[in-house]
């Protein structure tokens, strides 16, 4: 497993600007593109998240979601996953967009599939966590195929800090990037781990084309949403319980 760390200079670029939406210097995005060798580059997902968030502010939140969406993408809402294209076609851009930034990225060895997790703040000031799955398209661009998120319940206290960009993040100022190991030519891959799902849950999973990363979503009867993934690391599968979004218990 190859691991890289991208400085949160690439998140600080989201800093507020009194004269209007901030502009992201090309040099900052270029720095985010420096990372692992080979096809799998976590920095490219960081750069995609940066451009996605910037477009939400410049062009409109739902316009940006449509712009960065892959065919067949789904949004995992409180009632379950829905067809993103159909839902977004009915949405008008809000006056102010959600702000967000990635904090972790996991990629398959071939770089064709990636999962990002990060933090957001909505226009009302609520902060929370999101998970996005990215797929590399035929033209080399990354487009999202799955998106889920929820505000913290309860909202965070003093243990978390404002990073200056209007987004509540942990004190850790590094974006972590994880790349699955590439299998040796001719060697069999280890059997994938068995996932136990609740009998009442709806779920789906996907494996990267090179079979080095697998992710899943789950939606339980009580509204709990989960996203998890496994990736190949040092000859075995590494389990990452990426995120659980519990049903809200307070307003």
Image: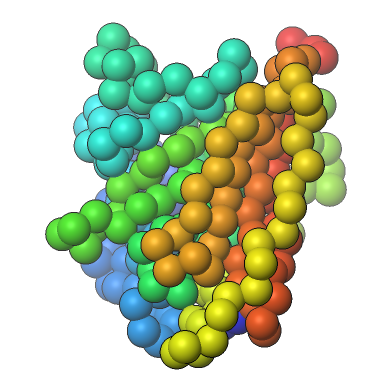
Above or below 30: residue 171: above
Above or below 89: residue 15: below
User: Foreground residue, 43 or 107?
Assistant: 107
Residue that protrudes farthest toward the left in the picture: 139
Give the side of residue 161 with respect to residue 30, left or right: right
Find residue 206 and report its horizontal and vertical position in percent: 50, 48
Q: Residue at x 49, y 65 (%)?
A: 211
The quadrant of the image that shows the C terminus is: top right
Give the side of residue 229 with respect to residue 210, left or right: right
Find residue 91 and report its horizontal and vertical position in percent: 31, 13
User: Foreground residue, 174 or 84?
Assistant: 84
Give the side of residue 213 with respect to residue 140, left or right: right
Find residue 208 and report its horizontal and vertical position in percent: 45, 59
Give the side of residue 84 with respect to residue 162, left or right: left
Asked whether the viewer can see residue 168, the reply is no
| Residue 209, quarter of the rendered image | bottom left
| Residue 111, quarter of the rendered image | bottom left
Find residue 88 and report its horizontal and vertical position in percent: 31, 19
Asked whether the viewer can see residue 230, the reply is yes
How many numbered markers are drawn?
A: 0
Q: Residue at x 25, y 15 (%)?
A: 89
The quadrant of the image that shows the N terminus is: bottom right
Q: Residue at x 53, y 69 (%)?
A: 212
Above or below 115: residue 93: above
Q: Residue at x 36, y 84 (%)?
A: 38
Above or below 130: residue 170: below
Residue that protrudes farthest toward the bottom in the picture: 185
User: Foreground residue, 143 or 32?
Assistant: 143
User: Foreground residue, 201 or 75?
Assistant: 201
């Amino acid at each position: 497993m190859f691991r890289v760390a991208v400085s949160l200079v690439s998140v600080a670029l989201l800093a507020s600007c009194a004269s209007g939406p901030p502009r992201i210097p090309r040099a900052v995005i270029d720095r985010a593109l420096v990372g692992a060798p080979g096809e799998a580059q976590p920095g490219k997902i960081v750069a995609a998240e940066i451009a996605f968030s910037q477009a939400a502010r410049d062009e409109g939140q739902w316009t940006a979601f449509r712009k960065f969406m892959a065919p067949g993408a789904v949004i995992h809402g409180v009632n379950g996953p829905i067809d993103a294209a159909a839902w977004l076609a009915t949405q008008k851009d809000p006056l102010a967009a959600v702000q967000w930034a990635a904090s972790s990225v996991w990629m398959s060895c071939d770089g064709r599939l990636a999962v990002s997790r990060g933090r957001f703040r909505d226009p009302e000031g609520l902060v929370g966590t999101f998970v996005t799955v990215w797929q590399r398209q035929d033209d080399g661009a990354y487009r999202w195929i799955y998106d889920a998120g929820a505000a913290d319940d309860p909202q965070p206290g003093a243990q978390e800090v404002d990073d200056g960009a209007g987004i509540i993040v942990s004190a850790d100022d590094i974006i972590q990037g994880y790349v699955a190991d590439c299998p040796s030519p001719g060697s069999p891959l280890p059997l994938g781990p068995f996932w136990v799902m609740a009998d009442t849950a709806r779920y789906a999973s996907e494996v990267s084309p090179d079979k080095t990363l697998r992710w899943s979503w789950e939606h339980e009867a009580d509204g709990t949403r989960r996203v998890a993934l496994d990736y190949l690391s040092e000859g075995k599968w590494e389990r990452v319980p990426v995120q659980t979004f519990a049903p809200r218990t307070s307003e």
